[in-house]
Image (tube, rainbow, N blue to C red):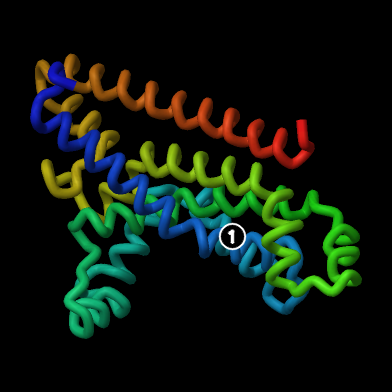
Amino acid sequence: MNWLGPEELDAVLLSLRVSFWATVCSLPVGLAVAFLLARGRFPGRQLLNSLVHLPLILPPVVTGYLLLMTFGRNGPVGRFLEDAFGFVFAFRWTGAVLAASVMAFPLMVRAMRLSIEAVDPKLEEAAATLGASRVWIFLTVTLPLIAPGIVAGTILAFAKAMGEFGATITFVANIPGATQTLPSAVYAFLQVPGGEAQATRLVVIAIVISLAALLTSELLARRVQQRISGT
């Protein structure tokens, strides 16, 4: 990447870092929520489903504003985290991770939920009749069957996190070297006369990363499916 300037390279590396941690942090929670929505029968299920998908419906700037009001230094959660643990989200790269996680979470959950709903419960029931524990059934029956959905959801979440802009710039601003992700850098360069070349280079990188993520998702899902079917 010698053809990238220092500011451009920082933006790309920060985007990769933010997307990675946003995906990793969302994965266990996303899988648990997907199971609740797919298999759970409890009061408030529809409310939970609505809350999960709310970031897809709300304008990203509104989501960023809500994060700022909640996790900012003057917000109830943000003030508590700073006083108790010295942890700050607002205007830090960790806040960009939080914003990307929130925006990517619905896509991850939806892919996993569809995969879980496609599993025939009779397969799990058959394993249970043979004396297998719930944990063993999940590890040996359910998990292999839903693995393509987990892979697809994870890659989609990573790609979404890479492209997140509105919520991120509202929550953590656009500080070069600190919170300026790839989309924010493109926006910043387009506001400066003569910045089109830099913006174009970043756009090309964004397209390459997105296509690579989608192709990887397809390849991994196919390999997992082939292992499950034994072909």
Instruction: Please tell me in which quadrant of the rendered image residue 171 appears.
Output: bottom left
| Picture layout, residue 1 above or below residue 37 | above
- Seen at 67% across and 68% down, the residue is 36
Quarter containing the C terminus? top right
The residue under label 1 is 31
Instruction: Please tell me in which quadrant of the rendered image residue 25 appears.
Output: bottom left
Q: Which residue is more in the foreground, 104 or 126?
A: 126
- Seen at 90% across and 60% down, the residue is 122
**Residue 207 placement (x, y as % from top left):** 39, 23
Residue type, label 1 = Leu
77 relative position to 185: left or right: right
- Seen at 60% across and 64% down, the residue is 33
| Picture layout, residue 115 above or below residue 200 | below
Which residue is situated farthest in the bottom direction here? 84
Is residue 111 at all visible to an observer of this figure? Answer: no
Quarter containing the N terminus? top left
How many labels sit on residues? 1
Instruction: Please tell me in which quadrant of the rendered image residue 224 appears.
Output: top right
Q: Which residue is more in the foreground, 96 or 222?
A: 222
**Residue 192 placement (x, y as % from top left):** 11, 25
Q: Which residue is more in the foreground, 60 or 81?
A: 81
**Residue 67 placement (x, y as % from top left):** 34, 63
**Residue 66 placement (x, y as % from top left):** 36, 63
